[in-house]
Image: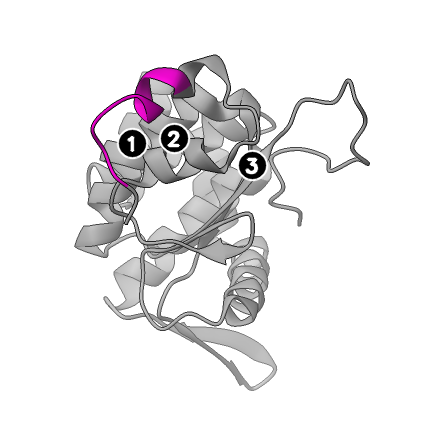
Amino acid sequence: MNNDSSIITEKADNVQEKVLIQFYYECLCPFCMRFYTEVFVPMVGKLGEYLDVRTYPYGNAWTNKVNGSYVFDCQHGTAECYGNKLHACALDLLENKTQALVFNSCLMNGYSDDSDADACGKEQNVDAVAIKECAKGEKGTQLLKYYGDESSDGHYSYVPYLRINGEHRARFNFVFKVCKTFKVPPPPCVEVINSDNDEE
């Protein structure tokens, strides 16, 4: 269950520099929804080939083991736990990780439920049935447990929580901050860096 969007290899002169983005979120958090749909996915669309993107759909949830099975308590209730599973299953099942991020962004334009999965699947030619089956089954539970463990290692107290190359950064002017991280900014960053944004 690997959420890496790219394989990390040793740097060489001919290897494109990539900036690591880690995004911890929960699917029904209004701030997460806004940032994911309005900033994060558009940024991936422009800079994706220069980024190593890792997302963690878990947020301020808790994992418990009851009678040998994992159960979850999510900040926005059981609907959010299920929505987070849909997100986790999309990341796991869709081989194109950018497509998975776009699919999850589509879910976050709604309520990340089955009807949204069906609509987004139809719109994007994605097998929503498989994603829903995953979310309803043991695979979805195991994936959410995995993202819970990864999120615990993230040591955050709120979401959306973002890191650039391992360092926590606020979501404001985020694309500018990403672009300023490159040692050699890629072409899509030139206009961003030359804008009037200032780093916070």
Front residue of this view, candidates 111 and 168: 168
Q: Quadrant of residue 18?
A: top right
Residue bearing mark 3: 19
Could you tell me if the residues under marks 2 and 1 are in contact, i.e. CB atoms within 8 Å?
Answer: yes
Which element is circle 3 on?
strand
Frontmost of labels 3 and 1 is 3
The residue carrying pointer 2 sits among few (fewer than 14), some (14 to 19) or many (20 or more) residues within 10 Å by Cα, namely many
> Disc 3, disc 1: CB below 8 Å?
no
Q: Earlier in the sequence, mark 2 or mark 3?
A: 3
Look at 30% across and 43% down and name the residue there: 199
Which label was assigned to residue 51? none
Q: Is residue 196 left or right of residue 150?
A: left
- Can residue 40 be seen by looking at this rendering? yes
- Depicted 61 relative to depicted 84: above or below: below
Q: Which residues are magenta?
A: 190-198
Mark 2–mark 1 distance (CA, rounded to whole Å): 5 Å
| Residue under the image location 44 percent in, 53 percent down | 85
Q: How packed is label 1: few (under 14 Cα within 10 Å), some, or many (20 or more)? A: many
> To which residue does mark 1 refer?
106
> In 3D space, how far apart are the residues under numbered discs 2 and 3 (Cα atoms)?
22 Å
- Left or right of residue 98, residue 176 in this image: left
Q: Amino acid at mark 2?
A: Phe
Which residue lies under the disc numbered 2? 103
Q: Residue at x 55, y 47 (%)?
A: 165
